């Protein structure tokens, strides 16, 4: 017989937070519609960060699996990678892709976290900006 466990969800603190990347997972995109979307939208990345000062506090960032720049606007996947690497990637580096995200595990960056109320009035944490450890915003 399966056992149920208690799990407490904690809303991550808002503000600029120094965070450590603890995991990256490729997951199914629950918003993917095969009749409307291109196949590259079927999967997305779940970036899991822990607050440096409160390791039990976690924040998830979901991005596409592509590093793109369109009309000078960077994808969130690219912003996360640049913040973790603390450098702006060249066009050549972006086009080369990142074959293994595990090289980013344990790296730190700053995340700007805001609180927003959802339709039910619950407080949700939303990451609005990414900064490298040196303070450079991506």
Image (cartoon, rainbow, N blue to C red):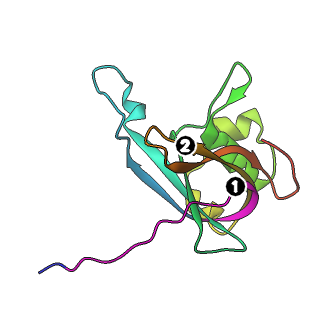
Image-based side of 38 in relation to 82, left or right: left
Which residue in the structure is indicated by mark 2? Answer: 117
Residue 37 vs 11, above or below: the answer is above
Residue 69 is marked as none
Q: Quadrant of the C terminus?
A: top right
Hey, which quadrant is residue 66 in on the image? Answer: top right
Q: Where does the image place residue 46, in percent across and percent down from the top left? A: 49, 52
Q: Is residue 10 magenta?
A: yes
**Count of labels in the image:** 2
Callout 1: SS: loop
In this view of the protein, which residue sits in the foreground, 84 or 3?
3
Q: Residue furthest left?
A: 1
Which residue in the structure is indicated by mark 1? Answer: 14
**Residue shown at 21%/80% (left/top)?**
3
Crowding at label 2, few (<14), some or many (≥20) Cα neighbours within 10 Å? few
Residue 53 vs 11, above or below: the answer is below
**Residue shown at 41%/33% (left/top)?**
41
Q: Where does the image place residue 2, in percent across and percent down from the top left? A: 16, 78
Q: Where does the image place residue 70, in percent across and percent down from the top left? A: 66, 22
**Residue shown at 34%/40% (left/top)?**
30
Magenta extent: 3-21
Q: Residue furthest front?
A: 121
The mark that comes first in sequence, 2 or 1, is 1
Callout 2: SS: strand
Magenta part mainly helix, strand or loop?
Answer: loop
Residue 75 vs 82, above or below: the answer is above
**Residue shown at 76%/56% (left/top)?**
110
């Amino acid at each position: 017989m399966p056992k149920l466990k208690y799990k407490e969800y904690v809303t991550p603190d808002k503000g600029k937070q120094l965070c450590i990347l603890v995991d990256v997972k490729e997951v199914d995109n629950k918003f993917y519609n095969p009749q409307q979307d291109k196949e590259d939208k079927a999967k997305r990345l779940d970036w899991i960060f822990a607050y440096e000062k409160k390791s039990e506090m976690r924040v998830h960032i979901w991005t596409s699996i592509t590093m793109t720049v369109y009309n000078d606007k960077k994808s969130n996947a690219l912003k996360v990678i640049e913040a973790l690497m603390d450098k702006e990637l060249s066009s050549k580096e972006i086009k080369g892709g990142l074959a293994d995200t595990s090289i980013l595990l344990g790296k730190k960056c700053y995340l700007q976290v805001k609180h927003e109320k959802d339709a039910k009035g619950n407080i949700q944490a939303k990451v609005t900006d990414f900064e490298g450890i040196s303070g450079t915003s991506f």
